[in-house]
Image (cartoon, rainbow, N blue to C red):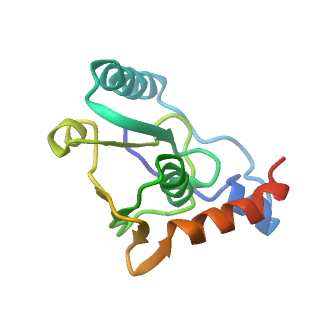
C-alpha cells in the first residue's frame, strides 16, 4: 500500500503549539489512498482485523491510546523512526488482529494485551490514559 510519511504540518499538535499552517497541501496519490482504503475495508469485512482506527487527529500515539481506551486493553508498540504525533491524509490506520492477517496490510508495530500502553520506553496505565483523555476533552469540542 501507499507509503506512510506523517507530518506535523497542520497537525493537531501543530495547531495546539500555535505553529503556522503550511503554504499548501501535500500531494496525495489518490490511487494509492484508494487501494489502502479498499484493503482495510476488505480486511474488516472478512473479519481478519479486530479493530481499526484512522491516524488523523493526533497521529499514531493518539490513535493507539484511543484504541486502548475503547477496547479496555493495553498494548505495546515500537515506533522507531515514526513521527508519533504526525498526520497524513488517507494512508494511516492502526489495526489489530492476528499477526499474519495484519502483516499483509503494512508494518507491524507491536502487540495488544495487558492493562497498560507502552510506546518505546514510555508506559501509561489505562487509568492514566483515561484521566489524560478526559482532561483534554474540553480542548476538542
| Residue located at (78% from left, 56% from top) | 137
| Quarter location, residue 17 | bottom right
Residue 127 x %, y %: 57, 68
| Residue toward you, 19 or 64 | 64
Q: Is residue 52 visible?
A: yes
Position of residue 81 relative to residue 37, above or below, is: below
Which image quarter holds the N terminus? top left
Residue 132 falls left or right of residue 137: left
In x, y percent, where is residue 89?
Answer: 56, 38
Residue 52 vs 69, above or below: the answer is above
Comparing 98 with 30, the one in front is: 98
Q: Residue at x 82, y 65 (%)?
A: 18
Going 62% across and 54% down the picture, which residue do you hit?
Answer: 58
Q: Position of residue 7 (x, y in %)?
A: 56, 56
Number of numbered discs visible in the structure rendering: 0
| Residue furthest bottom as drawn | 121
Residue at 42%, 55% in the rendered image:
73
Quarter of image, res 15: bottom right
Residue 46 in the image: x percent, y percent?
Answer: 27, 19
Q: As drawn, is 30 to the left or to the right of 79?
A: right
Vertical comparison of 2 with 19: above or below: above
- Relative horizontal placement of residue 122, taking residue 27 as reference (left or right): left
Q: Residue furthest left?
A: 100
Is any atom of residue 1 visible in this view? no
Amino acid at each position: 500500500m501507499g507509503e506512510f510519511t506523517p507530518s506535523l504540518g497542520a497537525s493537531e499538535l501543530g495547531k495546539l503549539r500555535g505553529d503556522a499552517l503550511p503554504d499548501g497541501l501535500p500531494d496525495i496519490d489518490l490511487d494509492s489512498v484508494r487501494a489502502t482504503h479498499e484493503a482495510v475495508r476488505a480486511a474488516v469485512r472478512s473479519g481478519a482485523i479486530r479493530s481499526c482506527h484512522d491516524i488523523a487527529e493526533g497521529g499514531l500515539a493518539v490513535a493507539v491510546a484511543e484504541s486502548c481506551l475503547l477496547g479496555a486493553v493495553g498494548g505495546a508498540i515500537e515506533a522507531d523512526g515514526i513521527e508519533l504525533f504526525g498526520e497524513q491524509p488517507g494512508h494511516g490506520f492502526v489495526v489489530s488482529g492476528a499477526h499474519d492477517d495484519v502483516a499483509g496490510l503494512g508494518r507491524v508495530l507491536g502487540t495488544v494485551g495487558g492493562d497498560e500502553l507502552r510506546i518505546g520506553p514510555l508506559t501509561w496505565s489505562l487509568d492514566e490514559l483515561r484521566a489524560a483523555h478526559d482532561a483534554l476533552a474540553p480542548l476538542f469540542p
